[in-house]
Image (spheres, rainbow, N blue to C red):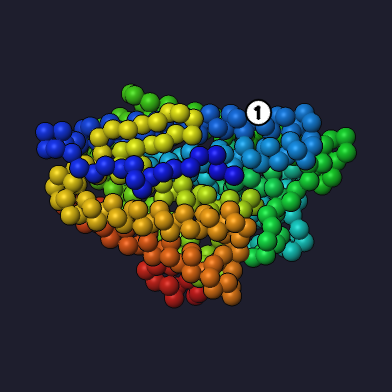
């Protein structure tokens, strides 16, 4: 269950007197401060996850597995709020695939149900099963996997064979190991891996010691990757320096590129509308844990954070500062009110989705074929995102920024292509 609730709608003040109006440098400073706080929170929550996993390994009980899963869910909250930084910041976008790539062909990692299939024309590693095989022979190449290390995962297996679905690292690899496959389709239920899959003395699923190795290596790698990005956003870090090098106009364009691209092409399109069109549970973001509603909700909160210059930290690292919202209010008060109203409406739509999931109907059930009410809730979320993106485009024009292109998605821009 989400441990922090955000009273966001009433908290944001848009207007300041002209004498106190935010300048671009102040706005960019707040933007960097929020990034730093979010990645530091992500790092700390990943360390908490590691402690829970170590407790599971030491005593592989169902209670400890449940606790490790809960720690994973909590770790997702601050991380998902960082995603508005991905688009526009090349440092983040180039790095992001190491920690949040999806969807993944889980047969690369561990055992899978027979319904998964035995091979794939697109992916020679489709059922490589690293946990079960200390030596992998793929495409005439032999890979030594006798010891599962962070280096093996990051340097050899991640996107092995140049196939993006070979996701060996990050949150979703850990998620699969903790939950196992979700074999319920659009019926109720998440993955249901037993704790004995991590019990070398009473092993189910086979290869428990290697499964533990993989889980520990992936968690250590997640921590080191988050350390890298936390350092990048610290004062003087590479991401801060890159942002400063763009100048005021380039920096503001970066903020709006992140907001618009996440809002439209990535979240509304690739992560939500596509799965809704296909009624396909494999197209949900946190597909093993049924935590997708929270990942989507936190993306929406993250967009608000960078616009309003406010971050409510689950660990107490709150940030409030000069904001893009204040700049827009000074330039065009009517547009400022419009933008706030659109962001508020989107938050409400996602709160409805979140409440429905917390009430017992998971996201993969909502997008299921024949669930008209659930489909409508998800479509309302898409519509709100598309609507707010139109206002973000107007903000770009009011601030006289140029050469900004938001990410698109066939599911929104060319729906017939989805079925070809």
415 relative to 363 in the view: left or right: left
115 relative to 83 in the view: left or right: right
The percent position of residue 394, horizontal first and vertical second, equals 21, 57
Q: Is residue 184 visible?
A: yes
Name the residue furthest top: 236
Packing grade of label 1 (10 A; few <14, some 14-19, many >=20) is: some
Q: Is residue 164 visible?
A: no
At a point 47% along the width and 51% down the height, the residue shown is 297
The percent position of residue 271, horizontal first and vertical second, equals 48, 58
At a point 14% along the width and 37% down the height, the residue shown is 17
Is 117 above or below relative to 82? below
The percent position of residue 95, horizontal first and vertical second, equals 46, 39
Q: 332 or 104: which is nearer to us?
A: 332
The percent position of residue 137, horizontal first and vertical second, equals 72, 48
114 relative to 74 in the view: left or right: right
Q: 303 or 223: which is nearer to us?
A: 303
- Quarter occupied by residue 220: top right
Give the quarter of the figure containing the N terminus: top right
Kind of element beneath mark 1: helix
At a point 11% along the width and 33% down the height, the residue shown is 19
Q: 185 or 101: which is nearer to us?
A: 185
Numbered label tally: 1
Is 182 above or below relative to 79? below
222 relative to 352 in the view: left or right: right
Name the residue furthest front: 10
Name the residue furthest left: 19
At a point 28% along the width and 51% down the height, the residue shown is 340
Is 104 above or below relative to 25? below
**Residue hosting label 1:** 51
């Amino acid at each position: 269950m989400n441990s922090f609730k955000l009273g966001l709608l009433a908290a944001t003040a848009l207007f300041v007197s002209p004498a106190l109006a935010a300048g671009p440098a102040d706005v960019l400073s707040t933007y960097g401060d929020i990034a730093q706080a979010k990645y530091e929170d992500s790092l700390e929550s990943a360390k908490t996850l590691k402690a829970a996993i170590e407790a599971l390994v030491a005593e592989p009980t169902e209670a400890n597995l449940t606790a490790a899963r809960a720690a994973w869910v909590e770790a997702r909250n601050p991380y998902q709020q960082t995603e508005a930084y991905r688009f526009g910041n090349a440092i983040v976008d180039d790095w992001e695939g190491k920690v949040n790539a999806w969807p993944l062909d889980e047969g690369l990692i561990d055992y899978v149900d027979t319904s998964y299939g035995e091979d794939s024309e697109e992916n020679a590693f489709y059922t490589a099963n690293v946990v079960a095989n200390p030596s992998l022979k793929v495409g005439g190449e032999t890979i030594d996997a006798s010891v599962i290390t962070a280096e093996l995962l990051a340097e050899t297996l991640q996107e092995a064979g140049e196939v993006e679905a070979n996701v060996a690292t990050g949150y979703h690899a850990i998620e699969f190991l903790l939950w196992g496959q979700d074999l319920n389709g659009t019926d109720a239920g998440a993955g249901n891996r037993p704790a004995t899959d991590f019990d070398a003395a009473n092993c189910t699923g086979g290869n428990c010691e290697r499964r533990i190795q993989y889980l520990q290596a992936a968690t250590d790698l997640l921590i080191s990757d988050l350390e890298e990005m936390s350092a990048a956003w610290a004062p003087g870090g590479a991401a801060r320096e890159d942002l400063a090098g763009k100048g005021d106009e380039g920096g503001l364009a970066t903020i709006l590129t992140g907001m618009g691209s996440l809002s439209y092409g990535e979240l509304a399109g690739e992560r939500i509308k596509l799965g809704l069109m296909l009624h396909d549970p494999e197209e949900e973001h946190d597909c093993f844990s049924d935590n997708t509603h929270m990942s989507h909700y936190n993306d929406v909160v993250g967009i608000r954070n960078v616009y309003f210059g406010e971050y409510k930290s689950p660990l107490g690292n709150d940030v409030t500062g000069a904001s893009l919202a204040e700049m827009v209010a000074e330039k065009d008060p009517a547009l400022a009110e419009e933008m706030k109203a659109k962001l508020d409406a989107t938050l409400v739509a996602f709160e409805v989705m979140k409440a429905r999931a917390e009430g017992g109907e998971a996201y993969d059930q909502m997008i299921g074929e024949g669930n008209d009410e659930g489909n409508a809730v998800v479509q309302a979320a898409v519509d709100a995102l598309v609507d707010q993106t139109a206002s973000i485009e107007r903000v770009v024009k009011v601030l006289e920024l140029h050469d900004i292109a938001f990410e698109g998605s066939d599911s929104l821009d060319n729906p017939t292509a989805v079925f070809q």
